[in-house]
Amino acid sequence: MASSGTQGSRSSAGPDSDRRRATKTSLPSEQRLANDISVPSYTYTVRSCKIVCITGASRGIGRACAVECAKHGATGFTLHYLGDEVTEKEVVELKQEIESSFTGARVVTVPGDIADAATAAKASLNILAYRGPH
């Protein structure tokens, strides 16, 4: 039997059709990025007197998360940073900013590679040892 060269009714639609298909099923809570990729939008609530541990807190998203958690009432902070001179200076400045700007905030910093078990354990123990005002 000879083959006609077609494979049923499938067509090669290409990568753009996949994006269009994904767009049609997007949830209302998604946000559009500049390159037309949709990502879920989340709202987090931080209650006062809560403890947060933020890895990579010396700059960028980690720093922004620390400041936002403080604004929303977190009082205990374990801030992890890489441990080199540059990130140490940045995290010390962040610690001073949080402790001077937000009443009751206490910050502990943990240097090192977070993938290292000892560094991760130190960060975890700081969280467990924290005794907030309540």
Image: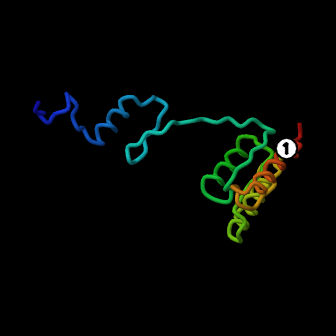
Give the SS element for disc 1. Answer: helix
Horizontal placement of 121 versus 25: left or right? right
Residue 119's image quarter? bottom right
Which quadrant would the N terminus be assigned to in this image? top left
Q: In the image, is residue 73 above or below residue 80? A: above
Q: Residue 11: x percent and y percent?
A: 21, 34
Three-letter amino acid code at the position of disc 1: Leu
Q: Residue 112: x percent and y percent?
A: 73, 62
Residue at (38% x, 48% y) in the render: 35
Callout 1: few (<14), some (14-19), or many (20+) C-alpha neighbours within 10 Å? few
Reading the image, the residue beneath label 1 is: 128
Q: How many marks?
A: 1
Residue at (33% x, 37% y) in the render: 18
The residue furthest bottom is 85
Q: Residue 127: x percent and y percent?
A: 82, 46
Q: In the image, is residue 7 above or below residue 130? A: above
The residue furthest front is 1
Q: Residue 79: x percent and y percent?
A: 74, 54
What scheme was used to colour the molecule? Answer: rainbow
Residue 51's image quarter? top right
Relative to the observer, which residue lies in front, 123 or 96? 123
Horizontal placement of 112 versus 33: left or right? right
Horizontal placement of 66 versus 128: left or right? left
Residue 42's image quarter? top right
Which quadrant would the C terminus be assigned to in this image? top right
Residue at (71% x, 71% y) in the render: 85
Relative to the observer, which residue lies in front, 7 or 15? 7
Residue at (75% x, 54% y) in the render: 117
Horizontal placement of 107 versus 84: left or right? right
